[in-house]
């Protein structure tokens, strides 16, 4: 009885000494700023900053002593706090948001075959370049929605990806995942976009999609500074996007849309009110 | 002979083989179509480079596409006629790829041929003739044969295996070829033996082709070639599974059969090699099985490479209503076709047409953990686990779970009672792993 108590006690004592020694000997110095940064970061581990997760970002920022790599989901608010902790001048975050530049759901765009495989756009794209006749339109199998760390993307009943502007943080994960490059990052305050991604000629676009850009130049004539047409596809010049709204009602195929007045058909998202996302001014 | 005594591999299954429709039908010659579409990519590797121009008159067997790189083969005109276009046309892969379109003159006049006696040629000369004839693996993978026959010096080859298994349902083209041209296959085997200097040669044939086994056994008596009946099980004809069944050697993960001293060739490839070396004729035609429930008169046809699929369907009695699924190759691993306008190429071992009611389309339900996919996987993988990793975008985990060893045989999807697209997920995993490796 006594022997076992003594033995166990001794083992315990020895182990405690060893642990204590190890803790001193192998102590890793952590910059207190790292923990402070980690506390204010959004914690989504989305990787949009270019580091592996928020802890990686905190470590990277402290190690490099620079805040040139911004945290897109955190936006201006978080970047100001980061600058304060690091004792550096604040960096402008240029808040961005993802936009699916396609409205061609299964009712509006033609399918060239009936896809039966894996529910993943990347797999479908490998099978004869995707089931949609349009070479650049949304395939609607929801890879972006699956990948979004913020749950900001929904698929409409007619298979079109729509991004909730209230939830999207502009991390850009969906942009990288989309095999057809239908999603692009745009300035947050720009609400008018050309929702088409096809560079085909107008006559061809009309054959496979009711809402495709036919490069008719009407938007450019209506608001000359706000639009440019390149390779048979119109796009908004985001430096001048405030004038872009004038052309929304003029577009013959209704592929220019102002998100302030609603999302594409079939979306359950409520129309965002302007300003779309609150960001504290610098 | 009881089935348990037959050599085989672990895993696999036996789908209804549906071969009765064509197994007893002799190979028929396909007449020329109105135009032949010859894609410059009819093999694995770099596409050939067109070396003819629109308006040029070409002879049958004339080289019209030059091989570009080591893993590439030349393309030849499969009949004489006029080149009417060099443009992107629909390829069996569903993409628009550069092709040479020939309008046949109906004469079938051959270009100048150089017959040779294989006994008098060296191994290097034989391989050169095989390359110049554009020979590729005709089981469907279309891997350039000359590459397989040129192993590096530190990989000695001691065994040659001829693949006459034809384990895919519906297909009977290799079976008919073994019955109708066994001497040519043997001539090809002798050329292969001379090139590789192997100690052992096997011909593996599934036991459901007793007539072919008996015929080849009789012809091979005393030649040192052993004809082995194999268990009737899919995918018995998969390269690594066939090697394991016959030699007991397992090809290590991520390597080629040459690692274990084996070269595997399809019997149809052996026949094509004999034609190429002895007669000097390049690979311009092949045998394929045209079958499936929608086809009125299923046939085994010898067709010109580049024949539009529609022409083959018309030769087999046409179809009444549009097919719901067109497959080039077998039902387990064949390639789904977008339209019948696509051409049959050097790798088209079959053309199968199915109506909507023939397709076992069931809604996908959750995995019930029955483990059937694990049981049947011939590569010993965990298909459900890897599919879950793909769903969760955990590509590194999928790589560590040996997703790259998947041979895409489709046994997992076939056996899944919940209709989960497992092999599709594995293909996706493989694609993403390769993409990651290229980027890293």
Image: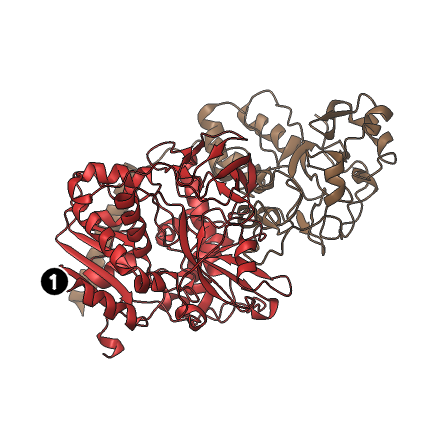
Is A57 drawn above or below residue B343 in the view shown?
Answer: above
What percent of the width, then of the height, locates residue B224? 13, 59
Q: Which of the image's four quarters has the N terminus of chain B? A: bottom left
Is B49 drawn above or below residue B178 in the view shown?
Answer: above
Query: The numbered mark 1 sits on a residue in which chain?
Result: B
Which quarter of the figure has residue A3? bottom left
Is A183 drawn above or below residue B312 in the view shown?
Answer: above
Residue at image position (57%, 69%) is B362
Q: Furthest-bottom residue in view? A: B2
Task: Tell me how many marks there are.
Answer: 1
Which quarter of the figure has residue B74? top left
Q: Furthest-front residue in view? A: B107
Residue at image position (75%, 31%) is A189
Q: From this viewpoint, is residue A130 visible?
A: yes
What percent of the width, then of the height, locates residue B396? 41, 47
What scheme was used to colour the molecule? by chain
Question: For this rendering, which residue is in front, B242 or A49?
Answer: B242
Mark 1 nearby-residue class (10 Å; few <14, some 14–19, many ≥20): few
From the viewer's perspective, tell me whether residue B160 is left or right of residue B323. Answer: left
Q: From this viewpoint, is residue A195 visible?
A: no
Question: For this rendering, which residue is in front, B420 or A67?
Answer: B420
What is chain A's hue in the picture? brown
From the viewer's perspective, tell me whether residue A125 is left or right of residue B347. Answer: right
Q: Which of the image's four quarters has the C terminus of chain B? A: top left
What is chain B's hue in the picture? red
What percent of the width, then of the height, locates residue B14? 38, 71
Question: For this rendering, which residue is in front, B110 or A189?
Answer: B110
From the viewer's perspective, tell me whether residue B425 is left or right of residue B26. Answer: right
Residue at image position (35%, 42%) is B282
Q: State the SS at label 1.
A: loop
What percent of the width, then of the height, locates residue A266? 77, 52
- Pointer 1: what residue? B222
């Amino acid at each position: 009885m006594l022997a076992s108590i003594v033995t166990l006690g001794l083992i315990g004592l020895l182990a405690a000494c060893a642990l204590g020694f190890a803790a001193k000997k192998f102590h890793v110095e952590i910059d207190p700023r790292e923990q402070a940064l980690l506390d204010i970061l959004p914690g989504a581990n989305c990787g949009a900053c270019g580091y592996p997760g928020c802890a990686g970002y905190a470590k990277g920022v402290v190690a490099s002593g620079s805040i040139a790599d911004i945290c897109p989901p955190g936006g201006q608010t978080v970047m100001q706090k980061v600058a304060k902790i690091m004792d550096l001048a604040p960096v402008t975050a240029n808040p961005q948001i993802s936009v699916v530049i396609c409205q061609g759901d299964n009712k509006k765009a033609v399918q060239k075959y009936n896809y039966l495989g894996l529910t993943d756009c990347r797999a479908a794209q490998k099978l004869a370049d995707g089931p949609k006749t349009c070479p650049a339109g949304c395939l609607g199998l929801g890879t972006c929605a699956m990948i979004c760390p913020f749950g900001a993307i929904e698929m409409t009943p007619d298979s079109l990806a729509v991004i909730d502007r209230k939830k999207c943080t502009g991390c850009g994960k969906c942009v990288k995942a989309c095999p057809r490059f239908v999603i692009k990052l745009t300035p947050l305050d720009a609400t008018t976009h050309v929702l088409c991604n096809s560079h085909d000629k107008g006559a061809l676009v009309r054959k496979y999609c009711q809402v495709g850009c036919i490069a008719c130049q009407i938007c450019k004539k209506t608001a000359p500074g706000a639009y440019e047409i390149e390779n048979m596809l119109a796009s908004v010049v985001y430096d001048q996007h405030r004038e872009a709204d004038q052309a929304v009602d003029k577009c013959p195929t209704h592929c220019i849309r102002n998100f302030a007045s609603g999302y594409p058909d079939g979306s359950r998202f409520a129309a965002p009110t302007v300003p779309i996302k609150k960001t504290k001014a610098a | 002979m009881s089935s348990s005594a037959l050599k085989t591999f672990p895993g696999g299954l036996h789908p209804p083989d549906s071969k009765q429709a064509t197994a007893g039908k002799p190979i028929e010659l396909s007449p020329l179509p109105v135009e032949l579409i010859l894609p410059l990519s009819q093999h694995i590797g770099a596409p050939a480079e067109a070396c003819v121009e629109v308006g040029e008159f070409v002879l049958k067997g004339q080289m019209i596409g030059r091989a570009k790189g080591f893993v590439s083969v030349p393309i030849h005109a499969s009949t004489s006629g006029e080149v009417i276009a060099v443009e992107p046309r629909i390829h069996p892969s569903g993409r628009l790829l550069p092709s040479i379109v020939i309008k046949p003159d109906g004469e079938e006049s051959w270009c100048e041929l150089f017959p040779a006696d294989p006994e008098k040629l060296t191994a290097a000369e034989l391989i050169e003739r095989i390359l110049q004839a554009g020979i590729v693996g005709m089981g469907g993978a279309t891997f350039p044969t000359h590459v397989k026959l040129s192993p590096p010096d530190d990989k000695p080859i001691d065994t040659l295996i001829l693949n006459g298994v034809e384990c895919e349902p519906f297909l009977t083209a290799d079976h008919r070829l073994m019955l109708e041209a066994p001497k040519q296959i043997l001539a090809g085997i002798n050329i292969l033996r001379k090139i590789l200097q192997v100690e052992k040669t096997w011909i593996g044939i599934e036991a459901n082709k007793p007539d072919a086994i008996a015929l080849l056994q009789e012809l091979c008596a005393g030649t040192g070639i052993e004809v082995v009946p194999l268990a009737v099980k899919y995918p018995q004809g998969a390269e690594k599974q066939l090697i394991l069944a016959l030699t007991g050697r397992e090809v290590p993960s991520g390597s080629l059969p040459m690692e274990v001293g084996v070269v595997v060739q399809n019997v149809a490839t052996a026949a094509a090699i004999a034609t190429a070396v002895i007669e000097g004729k390049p690979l311009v035609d092949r045998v394929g099985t045209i079958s499936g429930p929608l086809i009125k008169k299923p046939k085994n046809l010898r067709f010109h490479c580049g024949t539009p699929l529609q022409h083959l369907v018309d030769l087999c009695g046409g179809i009444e209503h549009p097919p719901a699924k067109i497959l080039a190759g077998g039902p387990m691993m064949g390639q789904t076709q977008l339209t019948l306008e696509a051409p049959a190429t050097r790798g088209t071992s079959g053309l199968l047409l199915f109506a909507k009611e023939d397709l076992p389309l069931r809604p996908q339900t959750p995995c019930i953990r029955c483990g059937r996919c694990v049981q049947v996987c011939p590569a010993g993988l965990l298909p459900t686990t890897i599919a879950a990793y793909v769903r969760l975008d955990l590509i590194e985990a999928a790589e560590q779970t040996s997703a790259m060893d998947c041979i895409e045989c489709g046994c997992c999807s076939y056996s899944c009672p919940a209709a989960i697209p497992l092999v599709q997920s594995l293909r996706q995993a493989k694609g993403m792993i390769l993409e990651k490796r290229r980027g890293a």
